[in-house]
Amino acid sequence: MAELVTGHAGKAHATAEQAAGLNAGILGLDDYVLNVHDKFEITVVSANKVTIGTGELVMRGRHVSQGTPEDLIVTNGSQGQKRNDLIVCRYAKGSQSVESAKLVVVRGTPTTGTPTDPALNTTSPLDGGTTYDMPLYRIPLDGITIGTPVPLFNVLKPMSDVWDSLTQRSTTWRVPYSSDSILLTRIGDICFMGGNVKFNNSGQNNYTKAQEKLPEGYRPVIANTPVAVFGGETTFICYGEANGTVTMLGNPNSAYTGCTGVWRTADPMPAA
């Protein structure tokens, strides 16, 4: 039977199960740390204590909030043995269907060989699981020493980042040795160069700097990135840098030619 969840029913009727279903449907059926607060940053305090920072996470649709840092105790290691412990966020449904979540250290098995991770509870609450573990960190121990914690979670980017990744801008760029311009398009952080031009001159270039620069908003992240590769009756390549400088290689050969180029930028998105 259909039920209006986000509506007044004259009685308490919206359930946590319904909220979890909505979260899972929008955010996905996996586990995610949200991109706010400390994102559960870990600090090793001593040989048997770590601190987990603040954060928000969603595990199979269940939202868990940690408003203050929390100390967790790691069982001391043993000389000559190695061990992998896991720090997890554990969901549990107890008597009378009361649900809870807490951070737990799951102790691994000591070994003189290569340690393996301990087993976790993997049946999703969406599938009726009453205990479920979302792994946050692997804590490697070598003897009595805690090694560098290994993050095991994905950070879910906000919708604003998704919007930015789909935003499109376009401009034109005048090509060296030509009075023609070609189209320069950006979608998210990816830039595309393409078009046809007629070169007016010939001249062999051996990494010569061009007078023309790439506009802000379209400059490549890495130096010596091929931003315009010309073919046909010429072999001529323009390489871009993060400051917009363009370096030329080859001979435009006074030819008619086509151009292509794709690269990534870290520039702010140009205004519309």
Image (cartoon, helix red, strand yellow):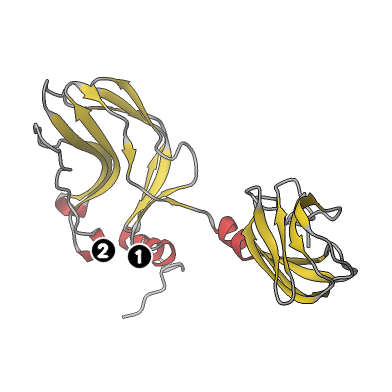
| Amino acid on which the number 2 mark rests in the picture | Leu
| Amino acid on which the number 1 mark rests in the picture | Gly
Instruction: Quickly name the residue at label 2.
Output: 126
* Residue located at (76% from left, 76% from top): 257
List x then y, in percent, for residue 238. 73, 59
The part of the image, by quadrant, that contains residue 233 is bottom right
The front one of 92 and 187 is: 187
* Residue located at (9% from left, 31% from top): 112
162 sits to left or right of 192: left
Looking at the figure, which quarter contains the C terminus?
A: bottom right
Question: Label 1's element?
Answer: helix
Is residue 60 at all visible to an observer of this figure? Answer: yes
List x then y, in percent, for residue 29. 34, 63
Residue at the extreme front of the image, as rendered:
204
List x then y, in percent, for residue 158. 53, 54
The front one of 9 and 216 is: 216
Question: Who comes first in sequence, dot 2 or dot 1?
Answer: 1
157 sits to left or right of 171: left
List x then y, in percent, for residue 15. 33, 61
Instruction: Quickly name the residue at label 1.
Output: 21
For residue 57, above or below residue 261: above
Residue at the extreme bottom of the image, as rendered:
1
Gap in Å between the C-alphas at discs 2 and 1?
8 Å
Tag 2 and tag 1, C-beta contact below 8 Å:
yes
